[in-house]
Image (cartoon, rainbow, N blue to C red):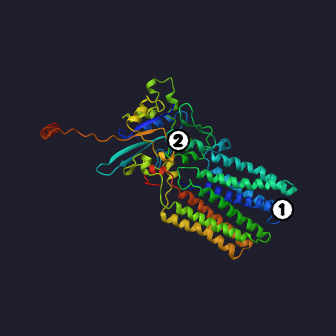
């Protein structure tokens, strides 16, 4: 699949934003750290800014954005529509949460709970846009939404740790929790790679109905690249994919993990967050570049 | 009704006439225009609703060249309709045709991602998705003579390899062909239940050889005729 830059920015940035909002509201519910009103509101605003950057990036992907408002209409069937509806609904809820913090409402727990729930739902629903597509084996898998949720919790958690350290708060167990989260996500991502090591499912035989014969393409029917080639047949050299995997593993997991344990202060945590975000962009690029759509079979690939 | 096409892989010669007739009709039809970018330049691009691919099936010397026209299969469980967030993609109850409301589409590409057949292409001009309409603006047009109330690709096919009809009616030509020739769906494992059916190439006919003497005579006669 062609990795559209707007979609990479959207899922990575908004994911970190929802993760940060999730940590903020979880802190409200479980009272782990005592934060000043100003600090809670600033963290909430930072999270919403990250989310808004991501959501506006997602609209660059639309070829006809003037009809984007119609995407709220198919809530019952379309994951993309659900994503749009939940993403918009979060704004008034977050605003009420901010008001609850500022005016010290008694109902603050409800608004924090709703923010936590919506952050979780939105990341899950975003991942389901991909996981619901049976045409792409590498996406149509339960690990996809699990990984999206883990990435959001991990990157948001690192931003949360940085903001706490920056305000001279004691991190305590957070370092251990984040370290465990990073380690667990690494293992999950590695098992995802392992699962899709060998091609399976549809083949050029099922795509052409000649189940028991050898089939090879002679002519794809167009002399210049078409929409189908540009969208579905994104070919990268195997060596480059492998290099990107190493780059992704070291920047998303290894370096932030090392920085987390080596010297957890505001500066190193900020560096770790920036490196992890770059790593997650690489991860999302790979998520697209390694996805094999079945249309490739009709262009001559034997298996996907 | 369950309208669709039966496509004969035995007789299709891969002339691309169906693709060009489709483009010609639909560029000025209800979903038109079908925009092209750089049509006379080095890398022409543009929206087509039908594309023909050519495969070699089996191994030499038994191998056969098979031309396979691919357009929308008007699936019974159309995932492209399910994923559409704006309601632009829809499947008609009355005849099963899958269509896109050009006034509602926001060009998010998700339906094209959900389609296994590459039947949907984004129009570079309008930024909306385009796909086969089964020439919905022809087949119900009472201004046309009845014989012409068929999709443009079907009318134009010089080898009659494309047959249009109602798969719900067991007496229709498409249903009979599907039964007699054991028409096959493409990528049935995905579970979209495509309506269009592909009729596999026929087995080569064994020529009666006659006796040894008769065979020899035939050979000589053939040689004389050839000269």
Does B152 sit above or below residue A300? above
Q: Image quarter for residue B70?
A: top left
Residue tagged 1? A38
Q: Chain of mark 1?
A: A
Does A195 sit above or below residue A299? below
Does A140 sit above or below residue B167? below
Q: Secondary structure at mark 1?
A: helix
Q: Image quarter for residue A68?
A: top right
Q: CA distance from mark 1 to mark 2?
A: 54 Å
- A51 vs B194, left or right, is right
- B166 vs A32, left or right, is left
Q: Nearer the viewer, residue A106 or B144?
A: A106
Residue tagged 2? B35
Give the percent coordinates (x, y) of residue B214.
Answer: 13, 37
Answer yes or no: is residue A255 visible: yes
Give the percent coordinates (x, y) of residue A138.
Answer: 54, 56
* Residues at marks 1 and 2 on the same chain: no
Give the percent coordinates (x, y) of residue B77.
Answer: 54, 41
Q: Nearer the viewer, residue B115 or A143?
A: A143
Q: Nearer the viewer, residue B203 or A21?
A: B203
């Amino acid at each position: 699949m062609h990795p559209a830059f707007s979609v990479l920015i959207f899922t990575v940035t908004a994911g970190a934003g929802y993760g940060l909002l999730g940590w903020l509201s979880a802190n409200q519910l479980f009272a782990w750290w005592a934060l000043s009103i100003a600090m809670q509101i600033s963290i909430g605003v930072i999270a919403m800014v990250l989310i808004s950057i991501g959501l506006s990036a997602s609209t660059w992907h639309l070829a006809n954005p003037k009809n984007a408002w119609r995407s709220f209409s198919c809530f019952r069937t379309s994951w993309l529509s659900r994503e749009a509806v939940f993403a918009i609904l979060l704004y008034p809820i977050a605003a009420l949460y901010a008001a609850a913090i500022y005016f010290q409402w008694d109902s603050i727990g409800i608004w924090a709970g709703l923010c936590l729930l919506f952050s979780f739902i939105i990341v899950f629903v975003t991942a389901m846009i991909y996981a619901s597509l049976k045409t792409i084996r590498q996406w149509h898998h339960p690990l996809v939404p699990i990984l999206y949720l883990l990435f959001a919790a991990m990157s948001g958690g690192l931003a949360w740790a940085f903001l706490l350290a920056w305000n001279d708060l004691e991190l305590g167990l957070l370092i251990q929790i984040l370290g465990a989260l990073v380690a667990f996500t690494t293992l999950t991502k590695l098992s995802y790679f392992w699962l899709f090591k060998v091609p399976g499912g549809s083949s050029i035989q099922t795509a052409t109905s000649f189940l028991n014969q050898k089939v090879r393409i002679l002519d794809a029917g167009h002399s210049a690249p078409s929409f189908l080639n540009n969208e579905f047949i994104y070919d990268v050299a195997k060596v480059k994919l492998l290099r990107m995997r190493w780059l992704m593993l070291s920047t998303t997991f290894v370096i932030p993990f090392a920085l987390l344990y080596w010297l957890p202060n505001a500066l190193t945590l900020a560096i770790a967050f920036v490196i992890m975000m770059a790593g997650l962009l690489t991860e999302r690029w790979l998520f697209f570049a390694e996805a094999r759509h079945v249309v490739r079979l009709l262009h001559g690939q034997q298996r996907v | 009704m369950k309208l669709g096409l039966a496509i004969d892989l035995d007789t299709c010669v891969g002339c691309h006439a169906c693709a060009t007739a489709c483009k010609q009709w639909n560029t000025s039809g209800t979903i038109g225009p079908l925009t092209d970018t750089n049509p006379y330049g080095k890398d022409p691009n543009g929206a087509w609703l039908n594309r023909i691919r050519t495969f070699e099936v089996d191994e030499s010397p038994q191998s056969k060249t098979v031309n396979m026209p691919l357009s929308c299969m008007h699936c019974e469980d159309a995932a492209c309709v399910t994923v559409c967030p704006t309601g632009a993609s829809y499947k008609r109850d009355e005849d099963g045709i899958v269509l896109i409301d050009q006034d509602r589409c926001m060009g998010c590409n998700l339906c094209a991602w959900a389609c296994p057949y590459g039947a949907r292409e984004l129009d570079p001009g309008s930024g909306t998705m385009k796909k086969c309409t089964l020439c919905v603006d022809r087949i119900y047009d009472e201004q046309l003579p009845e014989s012409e109330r068929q999709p443009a690709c079907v009318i134009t096919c010089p080898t009659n390899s494309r047959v249009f009809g109602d798969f719900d009616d067991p007496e229709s030509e498409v249903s009979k062909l599907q039964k007699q020739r054991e028409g096959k769906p493409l990528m049935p494992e995905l579970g979209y239940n495509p309506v269009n059916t592909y009729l596999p190439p026929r087995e080569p006919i064994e020529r009666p050889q006659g006796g040894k003497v008769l065979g020899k005579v035939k050979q000589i006669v053939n040689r004389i005729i050839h000269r």
